[in-house]
Image: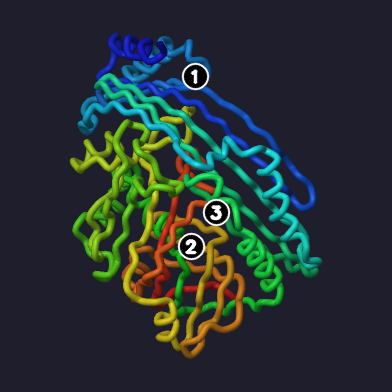
Amino acid sequence: MMEEKVKKALKKVDAEYVEVHLEETEVTSVRYSGKEMDSIGTHFTRGGNVRAFFRGGWGFSSFNDVIRIGEAIQEACQHARQVARDGGGLAPANPLEDRVQVELEDDPREIPLSEKERIARTYNEIILASSKIQTSQVRYVDKFMRRSFYNTEGTALHEERIYCGISFSAIAKDGANIQTSFDSVGGTRGFKTVLGQEGKVERITKEAIDLLKAEKVEGGRYSVIVNPMLAGVFAHEAFGHLSEADHLDENERILKIMELGKRFGSEELSIVDDGTLKGERGSYLYDDEGVPAQKTDLIREGILVGRLHSRETAYKMGEPLTGNGRAINFRHPPIVRMSCTYIEPGEKSFEEMVSEVNEGIYAVDALGGQTQLEMFTFSAGKGYRIKDGKIGPMVRDVILTGNLFETLRNIDAIGNDLQHHGGLGGCGKDGQFPLPVSTGAPHIRIRNVTIGGK
């Protein structure tokens, strides 16, 4: 009934192109902070939006009540005509019809809330068992989403998505010295994702305590081996965002730097974005413009060969569609976003990489960071000295800074141990956070990295 109503309304639009999104979500969460349970429960949302395109201008209208669909279509068309300008268009996309349902043996929606609470509480108790731990954070989340997409070109898609994950942080304190270690797991594989994580919880607890005794790293330039989590975050934050075409065409200097065909690293370096990786948090079948997800080569054997697109940016730049028009929910229009961005594996083992370093740093995990176009700063969760080809004592306050393009050229070894990571966080851009994404990489080794320190 609703589908017929939407299709009928789309036949009477006053714009070149119109699309309608309908969305229902069910989110269950459990959160512990220290000994106290902060929150527990399930909440539901329902709504939708309409986006209209006319002579290069976009109109957008969102709603919580599906009764407003007809009114929202009129509003979006009117807004698009008000901001219309000469030129502009959308890359052609084949009309599609599909219906995708979640099929999991351990669907999180079938698991009692009491069991989800028990798992979160158990992990929390492991962290708090040590007297050196000041407090903790444990958060469990599962999210089910049902989305429908229609447009004036004849596309009608119905896709269900589900996500399940858990994060845990340990905060240790010794006087004024406070140190944190954390980890998370998550994806679209089902409830089993959050089970059996006791080893990771014990590890992050021990690491938070060990960081209290770790020396601060000395500032300088080092050969640095970066672990898969930090390398994946680097690929996403420092390089991936520069591959998103909606910001590229607004900055002539970066567009010139990011010219296809330029060499950015050795022949061993390849970076891709792949929304089709089944089970990963950033995976999906269709983006929020009704375009199928796909694997997109960004750097192939050291050469810049591609970038990420919406239908509008693909039209502007005369490049193929990549299926990267995404929005966090119905309250926002889709923009160009990554999916599962990762560095492809090489041939070196981690042990080989370490054995070839006389003096350096092993940087592990990511506490945070920031990028400003091609410049970046990342804080590793922890680090270890490398001396005469062996891993040495732990160090802390490891902050890596540099120029993205110089750093890519200085990658001199890529490991054979690719790992993907989803977790509970997400990507932020233009006020849309957290978008489900995944990062990935093997261990990588980089020459002449600047590390801040004492």
Give left or right: position of 150 versus 37.
left
Q: Which residue is mark 2?
A: 229
Residue at horizontal 49%, vertical 28%? 331
Residue mark closest to the camera, 3 vs 1? 3
Quarter of the figure with the N terminus: top left
Marks 3 and 1, how far apart at CA: 33 Å
Where 59 falls versus 317 (above or below)? above
Which percent across, then down, holds residue 437?
A: 45, 47
Q: Which residue is mark 3?
A: 185
Q: Helix, strand or loop at disc 3?
A: strand
Q: Quadrant of residue 348?
A: bottom left
Residue at horizontal 39%, vertical 77%? 349
Q: Helix, strand or loop at disc 2?
A: helix
Q: Nearer the viewer, residue 79 or 138?
A: 138
Q: Helix, strand or loop at disc 1?
A: strand
Which percent across, then down, holds residue 176?
A: 77, 67
Q: Amino acid at mark 3?
A: Val
State which tag comes first along the sequence, 3 or 2. 3
Where 69 falls versus 255 (above or below)? above
Q: Residues within 10 Å of mark 3 (few under 14, many from 20)?
A: many
Q: Amino acid at mark 2?
A: Met
Any part of residue 116 in sight: yes
Q: Residues within 10 Å of mark 2 (few under 14, many from 20)?
A: many
Q: Which residue is mark 1?
A: 63
Residue mark closest to the camera, 3 vs 2? 3
Q: Residue furthest front?
A: 105
Q: Quadrant of residue 197?
A: bottom right
Which percent across, then down, holds residue 332?
A: 46, 30
